[in-house]
Image: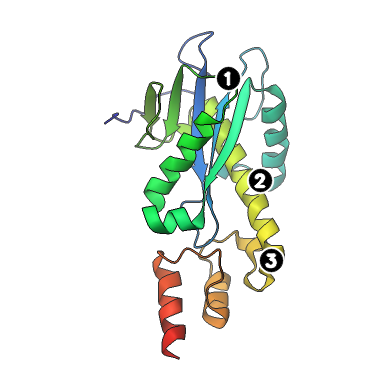
Amino acid sequence: MVRASKPNRLLLAPEQGSRVCGVDEAGRGPLAGAVFAAAVILDPEQNIPGLRDSKELGAGERERLARLIRERSLACAIAQASVEEIDSLNIFKASLLAMQRAVAALVVVPEAAWIDGKHCPELKIPSRAIIQGDAQIEAIAAASILAKTARDASMRALHGLYPAYGFDRHKGYGTAEHLRCLEQHGACPIHRRSFAPVRRALERRARD
């Protein structure tokens, strides 16, 4: 098991010239939709000002930075684990699977991976889990931005298929609006049936 660490300052990579990918996920908490992950190898020769944890950025700034990350990074990749995988594996394992897929999809092979959080997926390269890495490591912050913007775009697209739930607004999170929609309409195909609020809504509708 890789022990999580907490560095003291924002870093690009552990040493000059090394190819380290930052990895982060988006969408562990929502009641609907896939969980996304991204992996990014930044180019030390191409600066991207303003990189920080995606949760600290507005939607417009995230989109602007996502474009720069795609243009200026040495390599980046986005992957996901489906609702069916979340329900069969559990959200923790599905998140690690999405991370594993993102790293495997990089067109440049990294020398190591720095992962946001306490746990690392199974990888063929050395990996390091970093607590609050998205707030401290530029490559992980970049990955958090790509994962978040990709997942938000996915939920906006799914709103077109299931407009009754307001996915374009709450992105699947368990807001009061979303819970009311679950009560009124029941679960749709992209709801995570292993999550308690969805399961309870299904059980209530089955009793009615």
Q: In the image, is 87 to the left or to the right of 52? A: left
Q: Position of residue 123 (x, y in %)?
A: 40, 28
Closest to the camera, between mark 2 and mark 1, is: 1
Residue 179 x/y as whole percent: 52, 73
Of callouts 2 and 3, which one flags the residue occurring earlier in the amino acid sequence?
Answer: 2
Disc number placed over residue 161 in the picture, else none: 3
> Are there few (<14), some (14-19), or many (20+) residues within 10 Å of tag 1?
some
Read off the residue under disc 1: 108
Determine the residue positioned at 66% across, 46% down: 58
Question: Is 71 placed above or below 46 here?
Answer: below
Marks 2/3: CA–CA distance: 26 Å
The answer to whether residue 52 of the structure is visible from this angle is no
Residue lying at the far top in this picture: please name it: 16
Which label belongs to residue 119?
none
**Mark 1 / mark 3, whichever is N-terminal:** 1
Which element carries disc 2, helix, strand or loop? loop
Could you say whether the residue bearing mark 3 is in a helix, strand or loop?
Answer: helix
Q: Is residue 5 visible?
A: yes
Under mark 3, the amino acid is Leu
How packed mark 3 is, by other alpha carbons closer than 10 Å (few <14, some 14-19, many 20 or more), is few
Query: Which residue carries the number 2 mark?
Result: 58
Look at the numbered disc 1 and give the secondary structure of its residue.
loop
- Of residues 162 and 132, the one nearer the viewer is 162
Query: Of the residues under marks 2 and 1, which one precedes in the sequence?
Result: 2
Location of the C terminus by quadrant is bottom left
Task: Give the answer, above or below, for where 83 lies relative to 105.
Answer: below
x then y, percent, for residue 73: 65, 23
Q: The disc labelled 1 sits on which kind of residue?
A: Val
